[in-house]
Amino acid sequence: MGEHEIDTELVQRAQKGDKSAFDLLVRKYQHRIAAVVSRFVRNSAECQDVVQDSFIKAYRSLPGFRGESQFYTWMYRIAVNTAKNHLASQKRRPGADVELEDAEFIEGGIYVQNNDTPEHELLREELAQVVSKALAQLPEEIRQAITLREMEGLSYEEIAEVMNSPVGTVRSRIFRAREAIDARLRPLYESQRVRP
Amino acid sequence: MKPISETDLEQLSAYIDGELSDSERRFFQKRLANDADLRAACERAWIASSVLKSQPMQLMPAGSAEAICAQCQPETNSVKAPWRLVASFAALALVAGLGYQLMPGSETPAAGDRMMAQQAPVPSPAPNAAEAVPASVQKETAKPAATVVVKSAAPSEQIAAVNDPTRLELNEATRSKSWPKRDQAMDDYLARHNQMTGSNTGNDLISYAQLLSAPEADASENGQ
């Protein structure tokens, strides 16, 4: 079962009323959806509200989700439409205060740009540096295993073949890599997320 | 926040990669549903994964997932449930109505109303009521009553008919014109049967020999 099949299973459980399954989908995608919404809605509090509304709409629309597209793709469309509606309700135009040549053209004739605040930009840089440092300090075979998994998208079986190792060993190496990254990421993550 | 065991972290890592067996995955999902710390660790692993893949992301505040799920209510159930109930009852009533209409021997409501009107006894007016009503009104109200009573027999005639069943008249208004078919021979037979039953006092015993031989006797009498 691949990563997308896990999503499909979580969606099916959520469609049957299992809220813990939907909770996992929210945890998995809320930060990426927030990045999408932040390109339309600059204000951080408004952005969080729009993300929240998007997931609530998605939950209500779950009975009609047939799984023809991936959950993230479907969620992305809902988030973009919710962000557009939010701006329309406030009679605002996204990216109206930016130069056209700096903007990125998005579907629906709306111009947006990367609306990251310096704080968000700093946090993203910080996160990337922490993960990069943690990765650099890993033993070679562990780093190779997590790289093949995350960046190349190979399955455990394919990694085992590439590295000429048993699948159990691959599983253990990937877990060790994640454990090391999490040990560095956790303090930063917790300090950032307790902000009001 | 309690520390997470290595076994749990290893299971978690395999879970987010979709590399657990079906039974392991079901078991781990139950653990996730009941363990907030494990869910938080899962979320961090997804964040790390997004960073490694260089996917754009922006951290949402702590507790945002719980806040979102707390506001998630299924929209359709609360709205559709009463309509489903009403539609079910309407369908049931329709089927019952159609079934009643299609039953053999059932009468249409209009025919039933006519039957009730013709069979209903006419209330006798109070002694002084007629005096209180103006004459013009009395004339108008008297007309429908007259049409209803036109075929009703006097009490003395009704008693005589009970004693002599041959004098009973079939009610042509209520009698079905289509079914059963009127059979003169059957009518005569039943009339004789009733007559003999009425005159018989010996434990309802009827001489069927006499009953069945009566037509020939009548015929021979008429022939003579």
Image: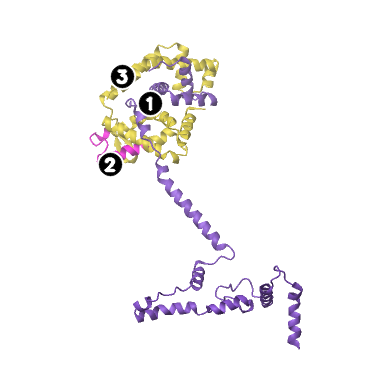
In the picture, measured across the screen, residue B31 lies left or right of residue A186, that is right
**Mark 1: few/some/many CA within 10 Å (<14, 14-19, 20+):** few
- Which one is closest to the eye, mark 3 or mark 2? 3
Q: Quote the CA–CA distance across marks 3 and 1.
A: 21 Å
Q: Which image quarter: residue B218?
A: bottom right
Q: Pick whichever, A39 or B183, lies toward us.
A: B183
Looking at the picture, how far across and down is residue B119, in whole percent?
51, 72
Note the chain letter of the yellow one. A
Q: Amino acid at mark 3?
A: Ser
Q: Are marks 3 and 1 in contact (CB under 8 Å)?
A: no
**Mark 3: few/some/many CA within 10 Å (<14, 14-19, 20+):** few
Looking at the picture, how far across and down is residue A99, in whole percent?
24, 34
- The residue stretch that appears in magenta: A78-101
The residue beneath circle 1 is B55
Which comes before the other along the chain, label 3 or label 2?
Answer: 2
Residue at the outermost bottom position: B224
Can you say which quadrant of the picture contains the C terminus of chain A?
Answer: top left
